[in-house]
Amino acid sequence: MSPAAQNLKSHEPAGLYIHVPFCRNKCPYCDFYSTSDLSLQSDFVEALMVEINLTADRIKAFDTIYFGGGTPSMLTTESLQRMLAAVRNKYNISPDPEITLEVNPGTVSANQLAAYRKMGFNRLNIGVQSFQAENLALLGRIHDVQQATDTILWARRAGFDNLGLDLIYALPDQTLQLWEKDLQQAANQGVEHLSCYTLTFESGTKMAQDLRQGRLRKPPEKLVADMMALTVDRLADCGYHRYEVSNFARSTALRSRHNQKYWSSAPYLGLGPSAHSWVEPERYWNKKDVAAYIADLGSDRLPIDGREQLERRQMITETVFLGLRRADGIDGARFADRFGVSVEALFGDAIRRFESEGYLTSGGGRIALTGRGMLLLDTIAAEFVGLIN
């Protein structure tokens, strides 16, 4: 066991992430690792069983489990059940874990959803992205609007009482009015959680290529800012509270417990090709190729592709960028405990200036961005980082 993993014994429970790399088609905006070669599914599951065995003693305890991708619902229910059973058997899982499964409409049936609930998944994250046909076509989604609403209905009937939807906005040619329509349709579904992401043109994706070649245009920055402000206002009217720049929940208890680990620098273990793990101060990641992943584990060898030991300045930088994304902001006491210096000592002048300008609040031992501040998140965080010594 590495020193970093040994030190984790005194830390809070970790999150477990499992990357299922299979998709029916590659969406043109997506830069997460995936493959449409479904013939590798059986070998992938076998390899994952080995990876679970090889990592069983790395982290003391977990209280969240997240199956992401890719499209985990492309696997058979038997495979998912086997994977979840192995996790419970080999790792120390808390008595009341959050166990999330990502599903995409068009890849699941009512019977599958009932099976997921029965085997122990208690939270679904549904990749809807939009309730408008033209947007779904642009984004390369395989489902239609009816399939999206059917999936939500089936999930409720299966007994899921914690549903999240993903939406994407700031699309080429999208108007403020069309985004407002999508927001309202999403809120009308009555789900517990909404993630609303601005479209990013990630290097290497088809959409980035279309942008470079002039087939697509980014919306104006002012329109994107207006869409973000509208998102916060409309969802607040519908009972959703923003707790991270892109995430909204009906209550504190319905926030994604797993995703909050990433934003608070809590430890997590990632399994599957391309998955990342973090045990302070070390980050490491798996090979971004399912065939190489399968080959390594077939030889009882972990498929680790790289490691980095973060220095103090790097960890403070990440804490600032991730902390300011959250409505709760940066916890001053935890910051001082981790880094041996107070937030005030490092950033006092900047805190007072941004607070006087209405971009930031301080109090109760925390600093947090206001709604106006969230619009300038990267600029403000970069200024804080420039003060780190």
Image (spheres, helix red, strand yellow):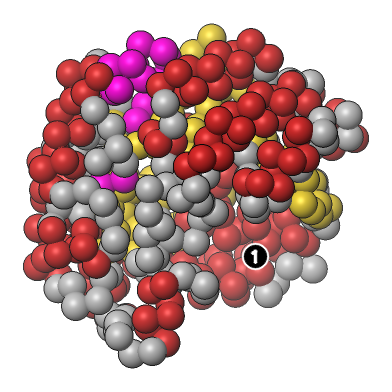
- Inspect the magenta stretch and tell me whether residue 115 lies in it: yes
Q: Residue at x 25, y 41 (%)?
A: 106
Q: Which residues are magenta?
A: 112-128
Left or right: 87 with respect to 181? right
Query: Which quarter of the picture shows residue 134?
Result: bottom left
Query: Which quarter of the picture shows residue 117?
Result: top left
Query: Which quarter of the picture shows residue 83?
Result: top right
Which of these two is toward me, 227 or 201?
Answer: 201
Left or right: 337 with respect to 362? right
Which of these two is toward me, 309 or 369?
Answer: 309
Query: Is the N terminus in the top left, top right, bottom left or bottom right quadrant?
Result: top right
**Mark 1 highlights which residue?**
347
Q: Residue at x 25, y 19 (%)?
A: 111
Task: Give residue 150's position: percent from left, percent from top.
Answer: 14, 34
Residue lying at the far bottom in this picture: please name it: 214
Q: Is residue 356 above or below residue 1?
A: below
Q: Is residue 85 above or below residue 354?
A: above
Task: Give residue 91's position: percent from left, percent from top.
Answer: 67, 17
**Mark 1 is on which residue type?**
Phe
Which of these two is toward me, 243 or 369?
Answer: 243
Q: Secondary structure at mark 1?
A: helix
Which of these two is toward me, 175 or 363?
Answer: 175
User: Is residue 253 in view?
Assistant: no
Task: Give residue 262's position: percent from left, percent from top.
Answer: 57, 44
- Inspect the magenta stretch and tell me whether residue 262 lies in it: no
User: Is residue 9 in view?
Assistant: yes
Query: Is the C terminus in the top left, top right, bottom left or bottom right quadrant?
Result: bottom right
Task: Give residue 159's position: percent from left, percent from top.
Answer: 25, 16
Q: Residue at x 77, y 61 (%)?
A: 313
Left or right: 357 with respect to 107? right
